[in-house]
Image (cartoon, rainbow, N blue to C red):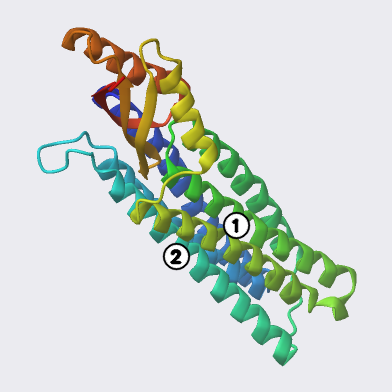
Amino acid sequence: MGISEHMMRDQGRVGRKVTLIGALANLFLIALKFIAGHLGHSQALIADAVHSVSDLFTDVIVLVGLRLGRKAPDEGHPFGHGRLETLSVAMVGTGLLGAAIYLGTEAGLNIYHHTEHHPTSLALGAAGLSIVIKEALYRYTIHTGRAIKSIALVANAWHHRSDAFSSVAVLLGVTGAQIRPDWHILDAYAARVVSFLIAKVGLEVIWGSIREFTDSAPGPEVLARIRGCARRVEGVIEVHDLKVRTSGGLYQMALHVVIDGDISVAHGHRIAKKVEECLDEEFEQVGEVIVHMDPSTE
């Protein structure tokens, strides 16, 4: 049971399409921000372009992760290749954290040195366009990531939004500097705040991937739903020894169900299959399900 090989290939293809669109958008935004930042005298926008470069880097990581992580199980990898997608998520989170440290450090130095920049309306327009594009990419990517249950796509969506956040900081700073030239420092303070927000998202993404790497069980509410689903199957007396881990965003389950010891093996096999079917219907993100049958001692 679980996700078929054909479905995994289709999901991988959809995920790669979304990521390629994001990569092309990032290439455009990198050129736009560097040119507009240079001609529009905005150091913040040039720093924002560097952030977009990190976005492009993570797009490549996600593409590789989706291609390898969505491969079907084989003899050497009986549980699939989901850990490769988890690895790409960890690298995306690290990229987010690195971008946050870079932007925060640059902003802190500008505040300390009272660096003055007087950006023009060109920088303002480029920052506004970046916000619109990156927010649209965030919504498109996170919708698709949730639809195909890809933790790598969801993480990359947050990278798009972090870029939008940094462009918001640029927009606020440039607007403030144009309203009053002596407010130029607002740019640096806004970037500093945004860097903390980006770092928070990066740490959450890294922590999620660490939980997968260490085979951490999902929350108690998920475990309760699994037990409840199995107990609803006719013929199941009790459920025990439930083990659940997550790999590539999919639940890998093993559980023991107690059944009447006097029924036939074929009947017991049908009960086990019904338990698998129930779990497939209950959860969209089901990978491998192993049901062990134990005879009742009563």
- The picture quadrant where one finds residue 199 is bottom right
| Mark 2 or mark 1, whichever is nearer to me | 2
Using residue 265 as the reference point, say whether residue 107 is left or right of it: right
At 44% from the left and 65% from the top, the residue drawn is 94
- The picture quadrant where one finds residue 142 is top right
Q: Are there few (<14), some (14-19), or many (20+) residues within 10 Å of tag 1? A: many
Using residue 185 as the reference point, say whether residue 261 is left or right of it: left
Amino acid residing under circle 1: Ser
Q: Which mark is residue 234?
A: none
Please tell me whether mark 1 sits on a helix, a strand or a loop: helix
Please tell me whether mark 2 sits on a helix, a strand or a loop: helix
Q: CA distance from mark 2 to mark 1?
A: 13 Å
Amino acid residing under circle 2: Thr
Q: Where residue 60 sits: x, y (%)? A: 36, 53
Using residue 6 as the reference point, say whether residue 106 is left or right of it: right
Going by the picture, which residue comes out furthest to the left? 75
Q: Where residue 261 sits: x, y (%)? A: 24, 15
Q: Is residue 158 above or below residue 116?
A: above
Q: Where residue 42 sits: x, y (%)? A: 68, 72
In the rendered image, the quadrant that contains the C terminus is top left
At 85% from the left and 77% from the top, the residue drawn is 183
Could you tell me how many numbered marks the image carries?
A: 2
Residue bearing the label numbered 2: 94
**Residue 143 seen in the current view:** yes
Residue bearing the label numbered 1: 162
Q: Earlier in the sequence, mark 2 or mark 1?
A: 2
Q: Is residue 112 above or below residue 200?
A: below
